[in-house]
Image: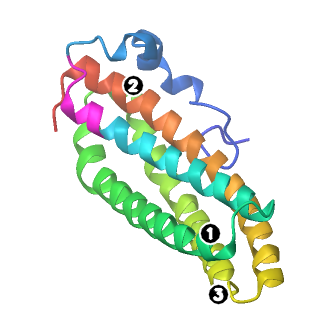
């Protein structure tokens, strides 16, 4: 098993935990280097988590017939489009701007940035399947039975993507925030 592979790992690989262990989550917000950059970046991660949660709740409500398709479809379109656009832009900024600047601030974790960048490839595949599933629901909104069937499959895809995205976001935070706290990097 490759402990660096997003599809297989169940936490930050042991070799990359050195700074996380020195700077546990409990001390982050009180640290002098927990500034606006870290706060903004963490808020973006929370937004992604909340959007996945909201889309999951609404898929469940629709499938439980507690939300009509006339409400569910426009919500899915709005939340899903926003989620895809924002996550894609977030990853581009990380890959092109932040990660290259953070590499080398502590050479013990440099492999972690390669791991995080590599995560973005399977996440892109998950996002494509997410978009296909959402579009499948939206394309069948006129046929309630077909919309329910598509929504069931979409919910499963959303749950799978949510778990892997949570793994990525948590590992990313456990790697990036401690290196920023240690170095004082401010973007």
Q: Is residue 88 left or right of residue 106?
A: right
Q: Can you tell which mark lies on residue 43?
A: none
Q: Which residue is mark 2?
A: 108
Q: CA distance from mark 1 to mark 3?
A: 13 Å
Q: Is residue 104 visible?
A: no
Report the magenta stretch's main SS. helix
Magenta segment boundaries in residue numbering: 33-40
Using the image, determine if residue 175 lies above or below residue 113: above
Tag nearer the camera, 1 or 3: 1
Q: Is residue 183 visible?
A: yes
- Camera-side residue: 180 or 37? 37
Q: Quadrant of the N terminus?
A: top right
Q: Is residue 149 left or right of residue 41?
A: right
Q: Could you say whether the residue bearing mark 2 is in a helix, strand or loop?
A: helix
- Camera-side residue: 70 or 155? 70
Q: Earlier in the sequence, mark 3 or mark 2?
A: 2
What is the quadrant of residue 76 in the picture?
bottom right
Q: Which residue is mark 3?
A: 139
Q: Earlier in the sequence, mark 1 or mark 3?
A: 1
* Residue at the image position 58 percent from the left and 30 percent from the top: 13
Using the image, determine if residue 108 lies above or below residue 25: below
Q: Earlier in the sequence, mark 2 or mark 1?
A: 1
Whole-percent x and y of residue 132? 62, 78
Q: Which residue is mark 1?
A: 72
Q: Badge 1: few (under 14), some or many (20 or more) residues near its Cα, within 10 Å?
A: many
Q: CA distance from mark 2 to mark 1?
A: 47 Å
Q: Quadrant of the C terminus?
A: top left
Q: Is residue 160 left or right of residue 114?
A: right
Question: Is residue 37 inside the magenta stretch?
Answer: yes
């Amino acid at each position: 098993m490759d402990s660096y592979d997003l599809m297989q790992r169940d936490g930050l690989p042991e070799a990359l935990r050195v700074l996380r262990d020195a700077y546990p989550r409990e001390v982050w917000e009180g640290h002098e280097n927990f500034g606006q950059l870290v706060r903004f970046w963490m808020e973006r991660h929370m937004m992604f988590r909340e959007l996945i949660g909201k889309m999951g709740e609404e898929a469940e409500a629709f499938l439980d017939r507690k939300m009509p398709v006339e409400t569910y479809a426009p919500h899915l379109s709005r939340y899903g489009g926003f989620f895809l656009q924002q996550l894609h832009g977030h990853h581009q900024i990380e890959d092109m701007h932040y990660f290259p600047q953070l590499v080398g601030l502590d050479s013990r974790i440099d492999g972690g940035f390669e791991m995080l960048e590599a995560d973005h490839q399977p996440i892109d595949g998950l996002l494509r399947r997410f978009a296909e599933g959402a579009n499948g629901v939206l394309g069948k909104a006129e046929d309630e039975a077909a919309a329910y069937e598509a929504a069931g499959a979409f919910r499963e895809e959303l749950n799978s993507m949510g778990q892997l995205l949570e793994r990525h976001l948590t590992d990313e935070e456990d790697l990036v925030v401690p290196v920023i706290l240690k170095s004082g990097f401010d973007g």
